[in-house]
Amino acid sequence: GAMRLAPRQAARSRAGLLLVLPALTVVALFFAFPMLRLLATSFEGAGLPWYAKALGSDGLYMTILLRTFEIAAIVTAGCVVLGYPLAFFLATTSSTWRSLGFALIMLPLWTSVLVRTYAWMVLLGRNGIINRILIDSGLMAEPLRLLNSQMAVVLGMVHVMLPFMVLPIYSAFHRIDPDLPKAAYGLGATPVRVFTTIYLPLTLRGVVAGMTLVFVVSLGFYITPALLGGGKVIMFAMIIEQQVREFLAWNFAGALSMILLAVTLSAFWLLHRGFARRLEG
Protein backbone atom coordinates (compact mmCIF):
# COMPACT_ATOMS: atom_id res chain seq x y z
CA GLY A 1 0.00 0.00 0.00
CA ALA A 2 2.80 2.41 0.88
CA MET A 3 4.54 1.61 -2.42
CA ARG A 4 1.38 2.51 -4.33
CA LEU A 5 0.86 5.77 -2.44
CA ALA A 6 4.38 7.05 -3.09
CA PRO A 7 3.98 7.45 -6.91
CA ARG A 8 0.57 9.06 -6.37
CA GLN A 9 1.99 11.58 -3.90
CA ALA A 10 4.86 12.35 -6.26
CA ALA A 11 2.40 12.89 -9.12
CA ARG A 12 0.30 15.20 -6.95
CA SER A 13 3.43 17.14 -5.99
CA ARG A 14 4.37 17.55 -9.64
CA ALA A 15 0.82 18.62 -10.50
CA GLY A 16 0.85 21.14 -7.67
CA LEU A 17 4.19 22.51 -8.87
CA LEU A 18 2.82 22.92 -12.37
CA LEU A 19 -0.17 24.82 -10.99
CA VAL A 20 1.96 27.32 -9.07
CA LEU A 21 4.65 27.59 -11.77
CA PRO A 22 2.95 30.51 -13.61
CA ALA A 23 2.65 32.47 -10.37
CA LEU A 24 6.26 31.72 -9.43
CA THR A 25 7.38 32.84 -12.88
CA VAL A 26 5.53 36.15 -12.55
CA VAL A 27 7.00 36.74 -9.08
CA ALA A 28 10.50 35.93 -10.33
CA LEU A 29 10.25 38.19 -13.39
CA PHE A 30 8.46 41.17 -11.88
CA PHE A 31 9.67 41.10 -8.27
CA ALA A 32 12.72 38.97 -7.59
CA PHE A 33 14.73 39.97 -10.67
CA PRO A 34 14.07 43.74 -10.30
CA MET A 35 14.97 43.58 -6.60
CA LEU A 36 18.22 41.76 -7.35
CA ARG A 37 19.00 44.27 -10.10
CA LEU A 38 18.34 47.13 -7.69
CA LEU A 39 20.56 45.48 -5.10
CA ALA A 40 23.36 45.21 -7.65
CA THR A 41 22.85 48.86 -8.63
CA SER A 42 23.23 49.96 -5.01
CA PHE A 43 26.75 48.47 -4.96
CA GLU A 44 27.89 49.91 -8.30
CA GLY A 45 30.42 52.72 -8.36
CA ALA A 46 31.12 53.74 -4.78
CA GLY A 47 29.74 50.48 -3.35
CA LEU A 48 29.30 50.42 0.41
CA PRO A 49 29.73 54.22 0.79
CA TRP A 50 26.20 54.58 -0.60
CA TYR A 51 24.95 52.70 2.45
CA ALA A 52 27.28 54.68 4.71
CA LYS A 53 25.80 57.88 3.30
CA ALA A 54 22.26 56.61 3.89
CA LEU A 55 23.00 55.51 7.44
CA GLY A 56 25.07 58.61 8.16
CA SER A 57 24.30 62.08 6.81
CA ASP A 58 23.92 63.35 10.39
CA GLY A 59 21.00 60.95 10.88
CA LEU A 60 18.77 62.70 8.33
CA TYR A 61 17.60 59.60 6.49
CA MET A 62 17.25 57.55 9.66
CA THR A 63 15.10 60.32 11.15
CA ILE A 64 12.84 60.15 8.11
CA LEU A 65 12.74 56.35 8.41
CA LEU A 66 11.70 56.60 12.07
CA ARG A 67 9.01 59.12 11.13
CA THR A 68 7.80 56.69 8.47
CA PHE A 69 7.53 53.96 11.11
CA GLU A 70 5.71 56.36 13.43
CA ILE A 71 3.12 57.27 10.79
CA ALA A 72 2.67 53.61 9.80
CA ALA A 73 2.11 52.69 13.46
CA ILE A 74 -0.46 55.48 13.92
CA VAL A 75 -2.28 54.41 10.75
CA THR A 76 -2.29 50.80 11.92
CA ALA A 77 -3.70 51.77 15.32
CA GLY A 78 -6.38 53.92 13.68
CA CYS A 79 -7.38 51.06 11.39
CA VAL A 80 -7.69 48.70 14.36
CA VAL A 81 -9.83 51.16 16.33
CA LEU A 82 -12.16 51.74 13.37
CA GLY A 83 -11.97 48.33 11.72
CA TYR A 84 -12.61 46.01 14.66
CA PRO A 85 -16.06 47.39 15.60
CA LEU A 86 -16.96 47.57 11.91
CA ALA A 87 -15.97 43.93 11.37
CA PHE A 88 -17.94 42.92 14.48
CA PHE A 89 -21.00 44.77 13.17
CA LEU A 90 -20.74 43.10 9.76
CA ALA A 91 -20.38 39.66 11.34
CA THR A 92 -23.37 40.01 13.67
CA THR A 93 -25.83 42.11 11.68
CA SER A 94 -28.52 41.06 9.20
CA SER A 95 -27.69 40.06 5.63
CA THR A 96 -29.10 43.33 4.27
CA TRP A 97 -26.89 45.54 6.44
CA ARG A 98 -23.95 43.21 5.81
CA SER A 99 -24.31 43.59 2.05
CA LEU A 100 -24.58 47.37 2.37
CA GLY A 101 -21.58 47.50 4.69
CA PHE A 102 -19.42 45.43 2.37
CA ALA A 103 -20.42 47.60 -0.57
CA LEU A 104 -19.27 50.71 1.32
CA ILE A 105 -16.05 49.00 2.38
CA MET A 106 -15.19 47.70 -1.07
CA LEU A 107 -16.08 50.95 -2.83
CA PRO A 108 -12.73 52.60 -1.92
CA LEU A 109 -10.89 49.59 -3.36
CA TRP A 110 -12.62 50.20 -6.69
CA THR A 111 -11.55 53.86 -6.69
CA SER A 112 -8.09 55.12 -7.56
CA VAL A 113 -5.88 56.10 -4.63
CA LEU A 114 -5.15 59.35 -6.45
CA VAL A 115 -8.86 60.19 -6.70
CA ARG A 116 -9.41 59.45 -3.01
CA THR A 117 -6.43 61.60 -2.06
CA TYR A 118 -7.72 64.55 -4.10
CA ALA A 119 -11.09 64.10 -2.38
CA TRP A 120 -9.38 64.54 0.99
CA MET A 121 -7.66 67.66 -0.35
CA VAL A 122 -11.10 69.07 -1.19
CA LEU A 123 -12.32 68.25 2.32
CA LEU A 124 -9.29 69.50 4.26
CA GLY A 125 -8.16 72.50 2.18
CA ARG A 126 -8.08 76.05 3.49
CA ASN A 127 -11.26 76.75 1.56
CA GLY A 128 -12.40 73.15 1.78
CA ILE A 129 -15.72 71.77 2.89
CA ILE A 130 -14.76 71.28 6.55
CA ASN A 131 -13.36 74.80 6.99
CA ARG A 132 -16.33 76.33 5.16
CA ILE A 133 -18.76 74.56 7.49
CA LEU A 134 -16.84 75.67 10.58
CA ILE A 135 -16.61 79.30 9.43
CA ASP A 136 -20.18 79.56 8.12
CA SER A 137 -21.56 78.10 11.34
CA GLY A 138 -19.62 80.64 13.41
CA LEU A 139 -17.55 78.05 15.25
CA MET A 140 -14.30 79.37 13.75
CA ALA A 141 -13.25 82.83 12.64
CA GLU A 142 -10.22 81.68 10.67
CA PRO A 143 -9.79 78.47 8.65
CA LEU A 144 -7.93 75.66 10.35
CA ARG A 145 -4.66 74.38 8.94
CA LEU A 146 -5.80 70.84 8.19
CA LEU A 147 -4.04 70.16 4.91
CA ASN A 148 -0.25 69.73 4.61
CA SER A 149 -0.01 68.15 8.05
CA GLN A 150 0.64 64.75 9.55
CA MET A 151 -3.00 64.53 10.58
CA ALA A 152 -4.08 64.86 6.94
CA VAL A 153 -1.61 62.17 5.88
CA VAL A 154 -2.84 59.81 8.59
CA LEU A 155 -6.50 60.39 7.69
CA GLY A 156 -5.87 59.73 4.01
CA MET A 157 -3.84 56.59 4.70
CA VAL A 158 -6.39 55.20 7.17
CA HIS A 159 -9.09 55.70 4.55
CA VAL A 160 -7.05 53.73 2.01
CA MET A 161 -5.94 50.94 4.36
CA LEU A 162 -9.14 50.39 6.39
CA PRO A 163 -10.54 47.63 4.10
CA PHE A 164 -7.31 45.65 4.53
CA MET A 165 -7.93 45.65 8.28
CA VAL A 166 -11.66 44.91 8.18
CA LEU A 167 -11.54 41.90 5.87
CA PRO A 168 -9.13 39.68 7.91
CA ILE A 169 -10.94 40.53 11.16
CA TYR A 170 -14.33 39.83 9.61
CA SER A 171 -13.02 36.48 8.38
CA ALA A 172 -11.99 35.63 11.95
CA PHE A 173 -15.42 36.66 13.27
CA HIS A 174 -17.13 34.60 10.57
CA ARG A 175 -15.34 31.42 11.73
CA ILE A 176 -16.71 31.70 15.29
CA ASP A 177 -19.46 29.20 16.05
CA PRO A 178 -22.67 31.24 16.70
CA ASP A 179 -23.59 28.80 19.46
CA LEU A 180 -20.64 29.88 21.61
CA PRO A 181 -21.91 33.39 22.49
CA LYS A 182 -25.46 32.01 22.81
CA ALA A 183 -24.25 29.44 25.33
CA ALA A 184 -22.33 32.12 27.23
CA TYR A 185 -25.39 34.37 27.43
CA GLY A 186 -27.45 31.37 28.54
CA LEU A 187 -25.02 30.79 31.40
CA GLY A 188 -25.42 34.38 32.54
CA ALA A 189 -22.36 36.03 31.00
CA THR A 190 -22.48 39.77 30.40
CA PRO A 191 -21.81 41.23 26.92
CA VAL A 192 -18.41 42.44 28.12
CA ARG A 193 -17.59 38.97 29.42
CA VAL A 194 -18.67 37.37 26.14
CA PHE A 195 -16.51 39.79 24.19
CA THR A 196 -13.38 39.32 26.33
CA THR A 197 -13.61 35.52 26.65
CA ILE A 198 -14.99 34.51 23.23
CA TYR A 199 -14.80 37.17 20.53
CA LEU A 200 -11.47 38.80 21.36
CA PRO A 201 -9.34 35.63 21.77
CA LEU A 202 -10.85 33.95 18.70
CA THR A 203 -10.38 37.01 16.48
CA LEU A 204 -6.88 37.91 17.63
CA ARG A 205 -5.25 36.13 14.68
CA GLY A 206 -7.35 38.20 12.28
CA VAL A 207 -6.31 41.36 14.10
CA VAL A 208 -2.65 40.36 13.86
CA ALA A 209 -3.00 39.60 10.13
CA GLY A 210 -4.68 42.95 9.50
CA MET A 211 -2.14 44.88 11.56
CA THR A 212 0.78 43.24 9.78
CA LEU A 213 -0.68 43.91 6.34
CA VAL A 214 -1.56 47.54 7.07
CA PHE A 215 1.74 48.34 8.79
CA VAL A 216 3.97 46.81 6.11
CA VAL A 217 2.07 48.40 3.21
CA SER A 218 1.97 51.79 4.96
CA LEU A 219 5.77 51.88 5.15
CA GLY A 220 5.96 52.19 1.36
CA PHE A 221 3.20 54.77 0.83
CA TYR A 222 3.99 57.58 -1.59
CA ILE A 223 1.00 59.25 -3.31
CA THR A 224 -1.09 60.04 -0.22
CA PRO A 225 1.70 61.56 1.93
CA ALA A 226 3.12 63.43 -1.07
CA LEU A 227 -0.20 65.18 -1.80
CA LEU A 228 -1.75 65.54 1.65
CA GLY A 229 1.58 66.33 3.31
CA GLY A 230 2.41 69.04 0.80
CA GLY A 231 6.14 68.38 1.11
CA LYS A 232 6.05 69.02 4.87
CA VAL A 233 5.50 65.40 5.90
CA ILE A 234 8.32 63.38 4.35
CA MET A 235 8.19 59.59 4.24
CA PHE A 236 10.96 57.28 3.13
CA ALA A 237 9.42 56.39 -0.23
CA MET A 238 9.32 60.08 -1.11
CA ILE A 239 13.07 60.36 -0.49
CA ILE A 240 13.74 57.42 -2.79
CA GLU A 241 11.60 58.95 -5.53
CA GLN A 242 13.32 62.31 -5.11
CA GLN A 243 16.77 60.75 -5.53
CA VAL A 244 15.70 59.22 -8.84
CA ARG A 245 13.59 62.05 -10.25
CA GLU A 246 15.68 65.08 -9.27
CA PHE A 247 19.23 63.77 -8.92
CA LEU A 248 19.18 60.60 -11.08
CA ALA A 249 21.05 58.95 -8.20
CA TRP A 250 20.03 55.38 -8.94
CA ASN A 251 22.84 53.93 -6.83
CA PHE A 252 21.88 55.90 -3.75
CA ALA A 253 18.17 55.30 -4.35
CA GLY A 254 18.93 51.58 -4.59
CA ALA A 255 20.75 51.67 -1.26
CA LEU A 256 17.82 53.51 0.36
CA SER A 257 15.40 50.98 -1.13
CA MET A 258 17.39 48.05 0.21
CA ILE A 259 17.51 49.63 3.66
CA LEU A 260 13.74 50.16 3.62
CA LEU A 261 13.20 46.57 2.45
CA ALA A 262 15.50 45.15 5.12
CA VAL A 263 13.91 47.17 7.91
CA THR A 264 10.41 46.30 6.68
CA LEU A 265 11.17 42.57 6.56
CA SER A 266 12.75 42.77 10.02
CA ALA A 267 9.71 44.54 11.42
CA PHE A 268 7.42 41.98 9.77
CA TRP A 269 9.43 39.11 11.25
CA LEU A 270 9.50 40.64 14.73
CA LEU A 271 5.77 41.37 14.67
CA HIS A 272 4.90 37.92 13.41
CA ARG A 273 7.25 36.18 15.85
CA GLY A 274 6.08 38.24 18.82
CA PHE A 275 2.39 37.79 18.12
CA ALA A 276 2.86 34.10 17.29
CA ARG A 277 4.43 33.51 20.71
CA ARG A 278 1.64 35.46 22.37
CA LEU A 279 -1.04 33.48 20.55
CA GLU A 280 0.61 30.14 21.28
CA GLY A 281 1.04 31.08 24.93
Image (spheres, rainbow, N blue to C red):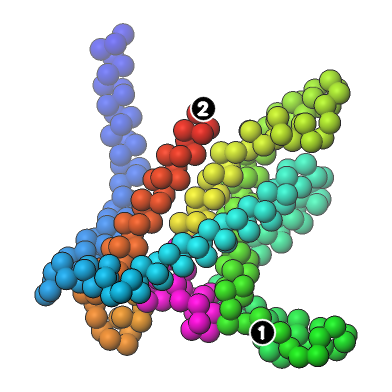
Q: Please give the residue where the numbered disc 1 appears in the rendered image.
A: 145
* Dot placed on the residue nearer the N-terminal end, 2 or 1: 1
Distance in Å between CA atoms under marks 2 and 1: 47 Å
Nearer to me, 254 or 70: 70
Residue 43 higher or lower than 114, as above or below: above
Residue 108 higher or lower than 216, as above or below: below
- Seen in the image, is 68 located left or right of residue 21? right
- Seen in the image, is 87 located left or right of residue 231? right
- Tag 2, which secondary structure? loop
Q: Residue 264: which disc?
A: none
One can see residue 41 in this view: no
Instruction: Check the image and name the residue furthest to the top.
Output: 1
Label 1 sits on what residue type?
Answer: Arg
| Quadrant for the N terminus in the image | top left
Image x and y of residue 152, in percent: 61, 75
- Seen in the image, is 244 located left or right of residue 157? left
Residue 189 higher or lower than 255, as above or below: above
- Residue at the location (62% across, 45% down)? 169
Label 2 sits on what residue type?
Answer: Gly
One can see residue 216 in this view: yes
Write down the quadrant of residue 220 in the picture. bottom left
Image x and y of residue 193, in percent: 77, 31
Magenta region, residue range: 218-239
Nearer to me, 250 or 19: 250
Q: Please give the residue where the numbered disc 2 appears in the rendered image.
A: 281
| Circle 2 residues within 10 Å: few <14, some 14–19, many ≥20 | few
Image x and y of residue 81, in percent: 67, 53
Nearer to me, 87 or 70: 70
